[in-house]
Amino acid sequence: MAEILGIGCTHAPMILFPPEHWVNVRKRLSERIPNYERPARLIEELGDDNGASHDKKNHKRIGDAFQVLRDKLHAWKPDAVILIGDDQAENFKRENLPTFCFYTGSEVKGYPFHAASDNNNVWNIAPEAEFTYKCPDKFASALVSSVIRDGFDMSSSTELSGWEWGLPHAHINPLMYLDQECKLPILPLFVNCIGEEAGDGYPPRPTAKRCYELGRSIRKFLDTRSERVAVIASSSWSHFFLTEKFQRRQFDAEFDHRNLELIKNGQGSKLAEISPEDIQASGDHEFLNWIITLGVMGDRPARIVDALDDQSQVSFKVFAIWD
Ligand SMILES: [Fe+2]
């Protein structure tokens, strides 16, 4: 039986950039929303410096939380790291977009700063820097066979060729905090969380129930193995610009706090019952990455390292460990 460590974190693009840059992220995203108006909570947080002091404080919280996750992950020495994130019309586009796809190649590359105009990221990394991760390809192929025999019509891919950034931002962004040295054996899982929201002709996202069942199927395979396997859920939860319930003006902190309590109390299986309508209304599309992880972990309580519910964060961000 494999030993399993669970990790949950955000992959928000803003985490790659210094807090002084975040005001531009909020501006760019809100400009996409017709008739956008700032919610009262956001106005309060921004204070009289347009959020500068608030952002600085939250930047430190995010860095500190990632450090806890990183220390745990490296000390634990996993043989494989199943990294669950969505490909948001990055490598996989409308002409061929799998609902779920495991990466079964022997290595994978990411260029998270590709086409940047300068080194304006947290680490001053040059724009064209390449990050190459070794992947546990035989383990991945055995996993794919197992879930197919268990009833999932799983897709797989041995290379990424859809765009110049390599790994999607859901996978490479957290790796900049968790493993910039490319030491961990990474096994990406791509999930179509965004669904129709990506544009005309894009297929619908899977249900929470199906995601949870996939997690259970992955767990069945892990229970036949002897490796040490870390599973990482990579995504923020509700996003303000996806939350139809609030006209895409604020994220659904109440919904996410309810879900957070369930995860903390070891009742993750309840989240398989979230309806597609609730996911859509609350802008929790990417939370599906966490629901797959919950399926793997079962009803094991999570330790919440931090949870940021400030509206200035754009999305609800949770950092968790299933020890
Ligand atoms: Fe994302």
Image (tube, helix red, strand yellow):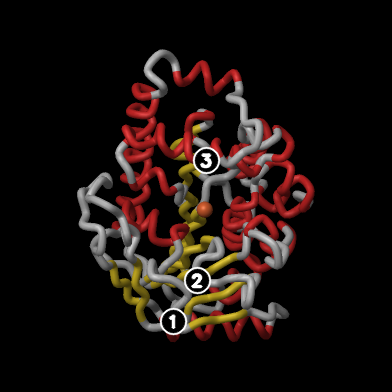
Q: Is residue 125 above or below residue 184?
A: above
Residue 264, image quadrant: top right
Question: 263 or 27, which is in the foreground?
Answer: 27
Mark 2 Cβ and ligand 1 under 8 Å apart:
no
- Callouts 2 and 3 close, C-beta under 8 Å: no
Numbered circle sitting on residue 29: 3
Query: What amino acid type is highlighted by mark number 1?
Result: Glu
- Callouts 1 and 2 close, C-beta under 8 Å: no
Tag 3 or tag 2, which sits nearer the N-term?
3
Residue at the spot of label 2: 91
Numbered circle sitting on residue 149: none
Q: Position of residue 299 (x, y in %)?
A: 63, 52
Tag 1 or tag 3, which sits nearer the N-term?
3
Q: Residue at x 61, y 60 (%)?
A: 292
Tag 2 or tag 1, which sits nearer the N-term?
2
Query: What amino acid type is highlighted by mark number 3?
Result: Leu
Mark toward the viewer: 2 or 3: 3
Mark 3 Cβ and ligand 1 under 8 Å apart:
no
**How many angstroms separate mark 2 from mark 3 (CA)?**
22 Å
Query: What amino acid type is highlighted by mark number 2?
Result: Asn
Question: 173 or 213, which is in the foreground?
Answer: 173
**How many angstroms separate mark 3 from mark 1 (CA)?**
31 Å
Residue at the spot of label 1: 159
Question: 83 or 117, which is in the foreground?
Answer: 117
Mark toward the viewer: 3 or 1: 3
Q: Secondary structure at mark 3?
A: helix
Q: Is residue 94 above or below residue 37?
A: below
**How many angstroms separate mark 1 from mark 2 (CA)?**
10 Å
Residue 41, image quadrant: top right
